[in-house]
Image (cartoon, coloured by chain):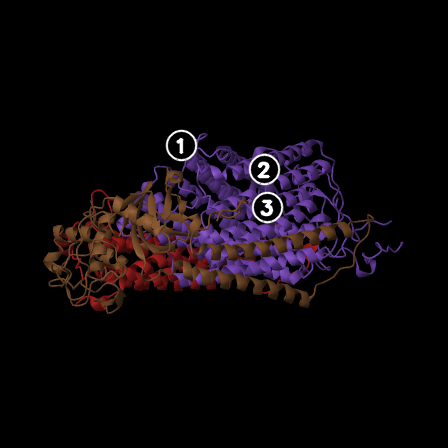
Amino acid sequence: MQSWIPLVPDSASTLSWKVDALYFYLSGVTLFFSLLISAVLIFFVIRYRRRTPYEIPRPIAGSHKLETLWTIIPFVIAMTMFGWGAQVYFQQYKPPANAIEVYVVGKQWMWKLQHATGQREINQLHIPVGRKIKLIMTSEDVIHDFFVPAFRTKMDVVPGKYTTMWFEATTPGTYHLFCAEYCGMNHSGMTGSIVVMEPREFDNWLSGNAASGTPASQGQQLFQSLGCASCHGQNGEGGRGPTLAGVFGKKTQLQTGESVTVDEGYVRESILNPQAKLVAGFGAIMPTFQGQVREDQLMQLVAFIKSLPAGGQTEAPPTTATPAPRQAASPTQNVK
Amino acid sequence: MADVINSHATTSEAHGHRALQHHFENMEQQREAGTLGMWVFLVTEIMFFGGMFLAYTLYRSKYPASFASASNHLDITLGTVNTGVLILSSFTMAMAVYFTQIGKRRPQILCLILTLMLGLTFLGIKGVEYHDKYRDHLIPGHLIPSSPFLENEAEAEHHGLHLLEGATLPQVEMFYWIYFAMTGMHALHMIIGAGLLTFLLIYSIKGRFDPEYHSPVEVIGLYWHFVDIVWIFLFPLLYLLGRHLEHG
Amino acid sequence: MRPIEYYEPPVPSKVNYINAQYGLKSWLLTKDHKRIALLYLGSITFFFFIGGLYALMIRLELLTPQGDFLQSATYNKVFTQHGIIMIFFFLIPSIPATLGNFLVPMMIGAKDLAFPRINLLSWYVYLLGGVITIYALLAGGVDTGWTFYTPFSTTFSNSYVVATGLGIFINGFSSILTGLNFIVTIHTMRAPGMTWFRLPLFIWSHYATSLIMILGTPVIAITVLLLAFERVARVGIFDPALGGDPILFQHLFWFYSHPAVYIMVLPSMGVVSELIANFSRKNIFGYSFVAFSSLAIAVFGFLVWGHHLFVTSQSVYAGMIFSFLSFAVAIPSAIKVFNWTATLYKSSISYDTPMLYGLGFIGLFTVGGMTGLFLASLAVDVHLSDTYFVVAHFHYIMVGGALMGYLGGLHYWWPKISGRMYPEGWGRFSALVIFVGFNLTFLPQFVAGYLGMPRRYHAYPPEFQVFNVLSTAGASILGFGMLIPAIYFVWSMRYGKRAEANPWHLPGLEWRTPSPPPTENFAVTPIVTWEAYEFAPPEETQVVGKFGPELEQI
């Protein structure tokens, strides 16, 4: 939906019009009060211009009634803006369940993305219309920001932690992707595009693009090659180290007594800094893998651990994306 | 802050007290301005030290075991002695102000000398502690090339620093960064305080202060008390952490 | 017709603070707050033109979508340095150090500030910070953005971060000393009869500003120090690769830098109160509300810093609290705008240059303030964060607001400061040019921002070009408009019409001394028996309104 008056960018997500509606409300109120104040000022300035050199107008001290009025009314209007903004914000930043996950790594000065089905992209993201997409992002170096004006959303991409954002595209097309946090020399060049396609076209695109393996299957390979299995078991069933199968998304108790939710950030932190949040009942014997794994590899390990069903089944993780990650699908061949 | 509606200075009080500055109406206004000025300055100091206390709080809650291990290695005897020394010096400083207010010059000078000596004692003991850190390789990073920070646990044990369960050396190093930043900043303020005390001493001996005019003594006294209070917060946070964890 | 002033005009004097002593030493070692104000005026103007030069380079680059004027590394230094110079070396000191230093003692009937030597020290500290920063700029510059976000500034930037940080650190003490001086002066040196609620609103706003200066500046000092430590000694406070937290830096940085924007705008609001009241010859409507709103802004201003972190993965609940508070802090500003407007009702308005700037402030600040609401509103801020909308918003406040107030105040008090009048015709003309140029520069940036143009980009997609061309055209007009006062102020010092003690015929204490004033301001400490903005005894005022003023012939 492209307007001939370029006041708003393309609207291509389920939330775009909501943000625009709030924006138009804010603009309307701003325009109203700016014009009102300007008009009153101009009127007064002309009406009460000095007519004789020595006139001194009678002083008017003030009016508590007026003060109350023009404190309460702006406050109420401000609260409507706050409330509306907060409501839409909750929708923008609460990642929905059942979203297709895409792993994003930002680095100076490019975006590296990997679909859950394994396809990798650079500076571009192909997504289908009408599906919720959740990005799990981190940075390899400095803070960046993943900004898609057409979706009216952005999120900082921070080194040392995972940040997430989500959107659901409504209209096929190609839309700007900008880095929106100054990151050095080629900050203006760290741009790309989001390509939204009809579902069928998207499936064609998927099958037409070689994937060497899903993040989860690549994660499984790393799990073996890095020796994780020796303490955590081949399928995360546990041993010298805590059980990993089926723990993702649940709460686990730490040595200090507090409990944490096992999310992407916790898994990543435990790989890089195992002593930070030790699971209760286990000794501090896990070595750190800082410097031995890249950020995209960490994401693959995270994807693998996410895919482990409770009970430690022996099947390989799915190589195609499924809405419920714990569903054990029969292993499909790598797409050629 | 009471509104001060000063009495209109008459031309017969042309110059006032010899220490009255030309832009003030009278000594009372000058004294009040000086005292308020010092209080406002101390508020800025609180904000300044507060930033470091915030960093300490954040990292202590992040690395409790490491911070406790490092804190246990600090010399609690020296720390306690220093605390006593500073508290005593605040007392002698308060006495110096009192004697100045009632015009007793000899006790005033004596108290100033005592305060100065106690302050220098504090700095001396701090110097001993810093030297011990140098000896035990606890100065962070490679700030002193001849004494780089501890490399491994064995070296730490050798120097008497026992790492508790869950403590790591990089986190211990963070403790020492904060330790040196805070005690160093505090020591800098003590040194400045010692300088100010010297100035007070010289002027007192020359007889510049009297019951009418002694606001520099009061104001520097305020500063000295503030530096003392900062230490009273620093001491338990740095030295008395996790003593209960020391032996398991 | 008898003259307006119903008090004794001051005895004219041949000796004033400018000619009381000659020689460089008498200026560089002065304790006179008025001379120190002039020292600041010179240095601040110098830094303003450097910052302006950088602005010119930015706008020239942005004329075309390609990055063809400057190399990208250079452009990054240019926008960084534009921000640093303008914020730390122009906006923060501008009104307090020039107009504040000059007028605070005079407005309260004092002979000088409480601590004249500390006042002089603050100027030298400012200069030292400035010299170190200029050294950093000349040696190669800094490219981190004025916000110095980590880990780029601690680990990845190859520019003069530590030197610039040192310059800013030292400059901060200048701010602290000025604020300390004002607070003590206003509390303890008011003339007899000058109660708090008889103070001009200029004093109230400088008092509120000083509170922010002393409470906030130490925090940026320690932040910049920690940043330098991290960069030099690789400590691990902010760099995640060393176990630090980059968002912690942002919290520490914005804890000062948000209140800092109130340091920049509150003094200007104080000037506007003076301009509106004095050029409409009417007391400010709702005086105590305007006075207390300054304090409210100072307090609330410390509670909203998190609105700069809405898109940093800060907790959504923290986001809600900061958004709510950010809306709350807008209310006192709105109250001021309404009270200023109400002051004009049934008043007697003259169209002198200072009034034009005052009126311009009200209009532009309304736009700037209300566009701030867009950014306080969480959902919209998610879209607008780091786009040109933000750039437009803060320039409306900083230039449309703070700078207008500064220029208005300079024109208003110029006769008192220099003893000369500026040329009124040129004054009005340049005010108009600046107003038009300013709006043309920044209005298109709102649109470009919502369309998605990110900030700190030196090359951009072609669809944004039209807005950038308009903006650069406006900037040229704005630049031209600002050169004119620079020229005529200097011209007036030699050739301007000599000003009498009270050229505007106003009741303020500062007008009851000769122009320029003698060094001690008042030969005899005044005793204040009149209310703020009391232009005449009640029986000598007229009703202005329906059928024109009804004057009582005397």
Circles 3 and 2 on the same subunit: yes
Q: Nearer the viewer, mark 1 or mark 2?
A: 2
Please give the residue where the numbered disc 3 appears in the rendered image. C400
Please give the residue where the numbered disc 2 appears in the rendered image. C474
Q: Which residue occupies the extreme right position in the image?
A: C553
Q: Is residue A239 visible?
A: yes
**Going 44% across and 36% down the picture, which residue do you hit?**
C459
Residue count near mark 1 (Cα–Cα under 10 Å), binned few <14, some 14–19, many ≥20? few
Q: Are marks 3 and 2 in contact (CB under 8 Å)?
A: no
Residue type at mark 2: give it.
Gly
Q: Quadrant of the C terminus of chain C?
A: bottom right
Residue type at mark 1: give it.
Ala
x then y, percent, for residue A318? 20, 56
- Chain A: what color? brown
Q: Which mark is residue B105?
A: none
Q: Is residue C343 left or right of residue B105?
A: right
Q: Is residue A110 left or right of residue C219?
A: left
The chain letter corresponding to red is: B
Residue count near mark 2 (Cα–Cα under 10 Å), binned few <14, some 14–19, many ≥20? many
Disc 1: which chain? C
Q: Which mark is residue C139?
A: 1
Circles 1 and 3 on the same subunit: yes
Nearer the observer, A165 or A50: A165
x then y, percent, for residue C3? 82, 49
